[in-house]
Amino acid sequence: MKIWKAYGSEHSMNLVMIGHFKTIDDAKRAKELIDEISAVIGQASPEPMGDLPPSERRFSDEIRQVFEKSRLHTLGPAELEQFLYDIHVELKGSDIVVSTDESEISAFLKVLIENGAKVEIYSAHDYPNENDSHGQEDTDE
């Protein structure tokens, strides 16, 4: 008889990340950038980087144009996959609220910070009512 010992990552993070911006317009621009990156990545192959090892991954011309236009210079090719995850991004006044069960969120963190956000991250498992108290009236329609 063999006993298999391994680590499983089936536990959901129930993660909430809130980018607090100085103005509603700043938050809208960051949300539009997230939406634009998600759309470009979504139009690419189902796995934008395929099976290439990290050292050989490169940006497509389309995503490079988005990064150049937005002056976003900190994302790495391996992080683009995060825009395909099941992540909910909501604009609430001058805040952007990102919620997900994923643990890989560095791409969203970088977009928020590079666009001037003060960022708060927590597990909604531990703070279940926090999200209700943040932001203002939902302006994302």
Image: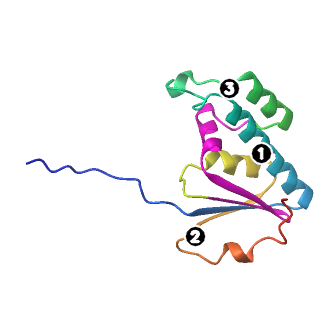
Residue 138 in the image: state x and y as whole percent: 83, 67
In the shown orientation, is residue 31 left or right of residue 14? right
In the shown orientation, is residue 66 left or right of residue 120? right
Marks 3/2 in contact by CB < 8 Å: the verdict is: no
- Of mark 3 and mark 1, the one earlier in the sequence is 1
Residue 69 in the image: state x and y as whole percent: 86, 33
Q: Which residue is mark 2?
A: 124
Q: Which residue is mark 1?
A: 35
Q: How many marks?
A: 3
Amino acid beneath label 2? Ala
Mark 1 crowdedness (10 Å alpha carbons): few <14, some 14-19, many ≥20: some
- Residues in magenta, as a range: 73-99
* Mark 3 vs mark 1: in front: 1
Of residues 47 and 31, the one nearer the viewer is: 47
Secondary-structure class at tag 1? helix
Residue 36 in the image: state x and y as whole percent: 79, 40
Of residues 21 and 97, the one nearer the viewer is: 97
Q: Which residue is mark 3?
A: 59
Amino acid beneath label 1? Asp
| Res 140 quadrant in image | bottom right
- In three-dimensional space, the C-alpha distance between marks 3 and 1, rounded to whole angstroms, equals 17 Å
For residue 80: magenta?
A: yes
Marks 1/2 in contact by CB < 8 Å: the verdict is: no
- In three-dimensional space, the C-alpha distance between marks 3 and 2, rounded to whole angstroms, equals 33 Å
| Res 124 quadrant in image | bottom right
- Give the residue drawn at x 70%, y 24%: 60
